Image (cartoon, helix red, strand yellow):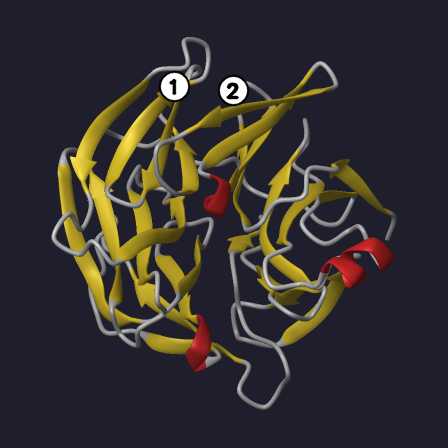
């Protein structure tokens, strides 16, 4: 497949890959640079926060929902204003938000983790119609949050565990049972980072340290991989007018300058035409 560079910005920790279905525009985060980025009319545009910002969804044409280190907020991309929605782990100053995505029911899922990467210090939360509820406690690096197209299954990973788990969802999108293993990576060199489901229900997960996005069936079978010229691929999303463009963020953190000089792809954001077909990102119900 022909991989092209969507944007040459070197993100320390690119994440939050997200295609806005109404604006027909791709957005992403650089967590450690405290910013949300996009491209408009061929130019880079960004919004700077006072703390880390990690994942995105959409509320309406102009407002994104975003998770920061201490809160869930809205960002008005036209006015540049940031408004609070609810607190997020204000009582855990050593944590920050990480991966997240909107579910088909209008809920917004957000993972948290320790800045010092303390084991089991994080969790996954779901915000839905004014309520924030912790749904998966005791995680170290929550990732791979994505949803089957029919809205009946959620997926997530604790990256260090090297599995992607599934949760059954009820009619309102809240989990109904204990998790089970959906994709087992323990006998492979790969780990799961950000993920998204395609229109057929397959799981596309960026695999940190492996320069690729791996594709797995709902039964957990490996289908194929899409390679990228960056070691630390971090989060995929489908976009474009027909949702057949695969975007993927990456990260430059921890990579030596000499290696970046030899391979400037580290930290860039990429796209691949015709990689698969995704599902439109779901609107978040505030």
**Where residue 40 appears, x then y in whole percent?**
65, 17
**Where residue 53 appears, x then y in whole percent?**
40, 40
Looking at the picture, tell me which residue is in the foreground, 28 or 222: 28
Q: Which mark is residue 22?
A: 2
Q: Is residue 221 depicted above or below 43 in this figure?
A: below
Mark 2: which secondary structure?
loop
Mark 1: which secondary structure?
loop
Looking at the picture, tell me which residue is in the foreground, 262 or 172: 262
Residue under pointer 1: 60
- Left or right: where 206 falls relative to 1: left
Alpha-carbon span between mark 1 and mark 2 = 8 Å
- Kindly check if marks 1 and 2 are in contact, taking CB atoms under 8 A apart as contact: yes
Residue at 73% x, 68% y is: 224
**Where residue 124 appears, x then y in whole percent?**
27, 58
For the image, the number of numbered tags is 2
Q: Is residue 1 depicted above or below 70 in this figure?
A: below
Residue at 65% x, 75% y is: 222
Q: Is residue 212 depicted above or below 73 in this figure?
A: below
Q: Residue furthest bottom?
A: 187
One can see residue 4 in this view? yes
Q: Residue furthest top?
A: 79
Residue 83 in which image quadrant: top left
One can see residue 228 in this view? no
Looking at the picture, tell me which residue is in the foreground, 63 or 243: 63
- Left or right: where 253 falls relative to 5: left
Residue at 75% x, 49% y is: 275
């Amino acid at each position: 497949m022909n991989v092209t560079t969507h944007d040459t910005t070197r993100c320390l920790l690119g994440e939050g890959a997200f295609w806005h279905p109404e604006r027909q525009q791709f957005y992403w985060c650089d967590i450690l640079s405290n910013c949300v980025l996009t491209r408009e009319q061929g130019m880079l545009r960004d919004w700077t926060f006072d703390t880390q910002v990690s994942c995105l969804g959409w509320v309406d044409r102009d407002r994104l929902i975003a998770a920061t280190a201490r809160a869930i907020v809205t960002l008005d991309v036209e006015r540049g204003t940031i408004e609070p929605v609810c607190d997020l782990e204000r009582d855990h100053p050593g944590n920050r938000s990480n991966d997240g995505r909107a579910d088909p029911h209008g809920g917004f899922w957000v993972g948290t983790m320790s800045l010092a990467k303390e084991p089991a210090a994080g969790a996954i939360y779901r915000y839905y119609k004014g309520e924030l509820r912790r749904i998966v406690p005791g995680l170290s690096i929550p990732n791979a949050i994505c949803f089957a197209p029919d809205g009946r299954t959620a997926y997530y990973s604790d990256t260090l565990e090297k599995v992607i788990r599934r949760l059954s969802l009820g009619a309102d999108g809240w989990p109904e049972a204990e998790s089970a293993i959906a994709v087992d990576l323990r006998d492979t060199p790969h780990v799961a980072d950000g993920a998204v489901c395609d229109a057929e229900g397959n799981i596309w997960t960026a695999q940190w340290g492996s320069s690729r996005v791996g594709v797995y069936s709902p039964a957990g079978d490996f289908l194929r991989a899409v390679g990228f010229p960056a070691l630390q691929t971090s989060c995929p999303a489908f976009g474009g007018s027909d949702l057949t463009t695969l975007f993927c963020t990456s990260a430059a953190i921890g990579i030596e300058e000499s290696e970046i000089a030899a391979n400037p792809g580290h930290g860039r954001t990429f796209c691949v035409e015709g990689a698969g077909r995704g599902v439109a990102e779901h609107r978040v119900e505030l």
